[in-house]
Amino acid sequence: MVATFVPKAGHIATIPLNEQRTVTADWYTTTCLPKVITELRKINPERRIIFHQDNASSHAAQKTRQYLTEENVELLDHPPYSPDLSPNDFVTFPKIKNRLRGQRFQSPEEAVDAFKNAVLDLPPNEWSKCFENWFERMQMCINLRGEYFEKKLSHLKLPTMLFYLHTQNLKKNVRARLELQLEIQLI
């Protein structure tokens, strides 16, 4: 298992879950988050960090929230039961799974390296498209009042949906807050 961290500009870190079978808030706040925040601050130390993660127990734990507050990282909440709003679930992991399909690995380390390389091989425009898609999905969630909508995507016409997005103040506010957005999802 790995935790992967992806801002709009592309992959920032992939951290394997070594010697541990469960992701805990302790592992998350002492191993994952310090590496990610350090990498983000190397890129632009003055820019604020707005962080998005799903509602896994290690992400929602008080220890995690406290750590992020101490590090001056803003947390963007994730709606409950919304896998269709997690960019790793609808973009990153399907693409990586397709690239790695059929391969066999001799060790967990080899599998993690293959995963990292596959993520790094994705072109930058894929990440940009991922976040554009994310905004569209957030608006669909609002329009459908939180209902799961993955199967409804094929029935919506993209130009109409994009026009609707452009007319909403929410889109502008969300875009501004998510400029340095970071998505976390555990495999």
Image (spheres, helix red, strand yellow):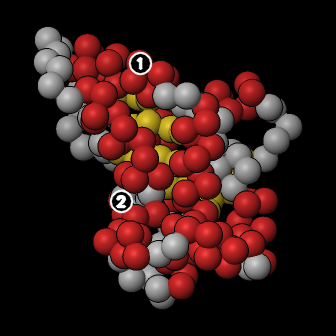
Instruction: Quickly name the residue at label 2.
Output: 57
* Mark 2 residue type: Ser
Sort mark 2 into few (<14), some (14-19) or many (20+) by Cα contacts within 10 Å. few
* Mark 1 residue type: Asn
Q: Is residue 91 visible?
A: yes
Which of 114 and 185 lies nearest the eye of the viewer? 114
Task: Give the spatial CA distance, label 2 vs label 1.
Answer: 28 Å
Q: Position of residue 37 (x, y in %)?
A: 63, 35
Instruction: Quickly name the residue at label 1.
Output: 117
Q: Is residue 34 left or right of residue 49?
A: left
Q: Position of residue 187 (x, y in %)?
A: 30, 42
Q: Is residue 5 left or right of residue 175?
A: left
Q: Quadrant of residue 108?
A: top left
Q: Residue furthest bottom?
A: 145
Between tags 2 and 1, which lies in front? 1
Which of 1 and 172 lies nearest the eye of the viewer? 172
Name which residue lies at 44% across and 57% down. 86
Q: Is residue 25 visible?
A: no
